[in-house]
Image: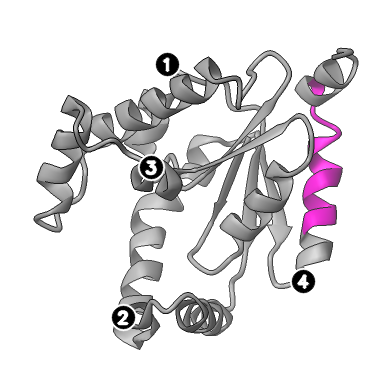
């Protein structure tokens, strides 16, 4: 399943909580990049782009993600036969979604909606101060991140038409989680996995 939403909608927060529940494995794309071994060929390619402040190409992004997923499978952290993969931060655009189709089957897209852009900005300012990322607190950076989401990531909603569940992200976090769980336990893939005894 994918968690999609504008910056500040709560993707990471909800993904982390879901990842603590047995049978769900949370994968945040940012964590994948942070845990990257820069001594490998793929790691070197990533550094070549990121060190110049350039966007990492979509194919390389998915390759890096795929290598990390394989590592987690090899070390039994992620068990694809019994765990539902919860993706947050990937795919970021329709091209990545197309490439990702060779790696995973997307059963449900949780779209955390927050039409109130001022609320998103407030949340991002609060988060940046809490995490000590003061550069992210500027109105200019926040506006840019929301604009990038609108242009690049929001078209995923149309790409995954028929699999999208809109959930109001302006509710209290526990209520958002409750709404997400209600969606997830109704997925056929969840029902199938819930019957597997481990």
Residue under numbered circle 4 = 171
Q: Which mark is residue 102?
A: 1
Q: Nearer the viewer, mark 3 or mark 1?
A: 3
Q: Earlier in the sequence, mark 4 or mark 2?
A: 2
Which numbered disc, 1 or 4, marks the residue that appears first in the sequence? 1
Spatial CA distance of label 3 from label 4 is 32 Å
Q: Secondary structure at mark 1?
A: loop
Cα gap from disc 3 to disc 1, whole angstroms: 23 Å
Of 54 and 182, the residue lying toward us:
54
Residue 106, quarter of the rendered image: top right
Q: As displayed, is residue 153 above or below residue 124?
A: above
Report if the CB atoms under discs 3 and 4 are less than 8 Å apart.
Answer: no
Q: Secondary structure at mark 4?
A: loop
Quickly name the residue at label 2.
135
- Queried whether the magenta region covers residue 14, the answer comes back as no
Q: Residue at (28%, 35%) from the top-left corner?
A: 37
Q: Look at mark 3 in the image and give the residue it sits on.
A: 35
Does the magenta stretch mainly form a helix, a strand or a loop? helix
Callouts 2 and 1 close, C-beta under 8 Å: no
Q: Determine whether 35 is above or below 118 in the image.
A: above
């Amino acid at each position: 399943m994918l968690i999609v939403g504008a910056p500040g909608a709560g993707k990471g927060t909800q993904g982390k909580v879901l990842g603590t529940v047995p049978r769900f494995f949370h994968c945040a794309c940012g964590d994948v990049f942070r845990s990257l071994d820069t001594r490998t060929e793929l790691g070197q390619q990533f550094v070549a782009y990121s060190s110049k402040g350039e966007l990492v190409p979509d194919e390389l992004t998915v390759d890096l993600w795929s290598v990390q997923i394989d590592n987690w499978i090899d070390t039994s952290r992620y068990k694809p036969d019994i765990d539902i993969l919860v993706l947050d931060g990937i795919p970021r655009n329709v091209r990545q979604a197309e490439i990702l189709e060779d790696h995973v089957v997307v059963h449900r897209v949780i779209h955390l909606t927050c039409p109130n852009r001022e609320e998103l900005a407030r949340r991002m300012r609060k988060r940046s101060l809490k995490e000590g990322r003061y550069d992210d607190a500027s109105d200019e950076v926040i506006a840019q991140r929301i604009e990038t989401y609108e242009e690049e990531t929001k078209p995923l909603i149309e790409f995954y038409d028929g699999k999208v569940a809109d959930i109001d992200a302006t509710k209290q976090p526990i209520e958002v989680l409750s709404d997400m769980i209600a969606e997830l336990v109704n997925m056929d893939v969840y029902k199938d996995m819930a019957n597997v005894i481990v």
